[in-house]
Amino acid sequence: MVPAHTVHTFAYKHVQGKPIELDVYVTDPKPTTPRPLILYFHGGYIISGSRAAVRPWLLQASLRRHWTFVSADYRVLPESTGHDLLADLRSAYAWVATELNTHFPNLVDPSRLIVTGSSGGGYCAVLGGAQFHNPVPKAVWAIYPIVDPAAERWITPGIPLPDVKVEDAAPTLKEMEQRKANGEISFGETFPKDGDMSTHQRYPYLRYILQEGLFADYVTGIKGLGERVRNEGREKVMTEAMHELFPLDFGITREYPPLVVVHGTKDRGVGVEESERLVERVKAVGGRVDYFAVEGKDHGFDFVVEDCEEGEGRDEGALALESCLKALDGYVGGSGGTLSS
């Protein structure tokens, strides 16, 4: 059971006159001591999804610890680029670090901020570890993350999403390009609870970009980039302006925050090799990393987890998530007590 709490929605910035919002979950709006905060970026391949997609186990574990939990929207592809996305991530992080305490005095300890996300949101979290400063995050938690937008999986045409039939993409491309030409923006779309993607308006965009191998093109806003990387190699085509969007190549240094990574070894949506490369890169520069590979688990293995810390019959996925939380406990220190579920 998720501990008693209240939810408060704020606009952390406006773009084209439209608010980009985040939800703040708190167990006590008038705490006696500041607490850690966990900033969550939703999944959806940075093409869809929304801040409403908060997993029960994650919210429950955070609120048990009296951590403030925040879930934020951001601009998504293809209407926006990765540069726009990163600008929003920076804004959301700065807002929780500096503005949230003006609404709830003494709520947040800015020296104990955790940045996390799953899938595309994991890419956001990994980006944050490289790009967020003043204060630097206390830890980054990447849950089956996309790590490298120019990895072979994302720039090779003909690789559809798991269990998805490849269909004629021409109408989707026309619609996407028209939205871009009109200067439209999107903050994502909540996935249907029943899993029926036929009703999800952004699903054709997601399917098209991934199966056509155009992820790097839309992340950077540069048409043909993925093909050039395939043919010429990234060293020849990556300009300095692109570096901020490729943390694996250009963002991992010894100063990178402590990193916690969890990934299923049979992930068909985002291959486990992405996390393995990230972990090895952090180790190579002498950084701190805790890695939990979950044997046999697919993408979104945590969707079926209700509570990863209590109860009998928890599977390998739940136990790995519990191990991640224990690692984070070690990085943020005392959290103000633990609530019973």
Image: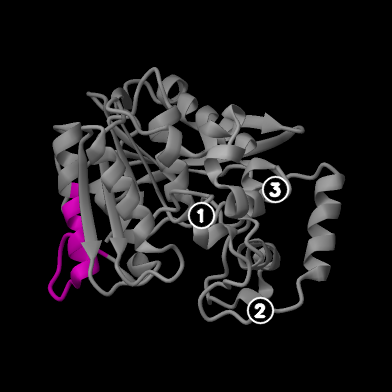
In the image, residue 96 above or below residue 63: above
Image coordinates of residue 341 in percent, x first then y, are 20, 57
Which is closer to the viewer, label 2 or label 1? Answer: 2
Alpha-carbon span between mark 1 and mark 3: 15 Å
Element assignment for label 3: loop
Residue wearing tag 1: 52
Residue wearing tag 3: 186
- Residue 188 in sight from this viewpoint: no
Residue wearing tag 2: 166
- The type of residue carrying mark 2 is Val
- The type of residue carrying mark 1 is Ala
Q: Residues within 10 Å of mark 2 (few under 14, many from 20)?
A: some
Query: In the image, which residues are magenta?
Result: 307-325
Image coordinates of residue 220 in percent, x first then y, are 64, 41
In the image, residue 155 above or below residue 133: below
In the picture, residue 136 is in which quadrant?
A: top left
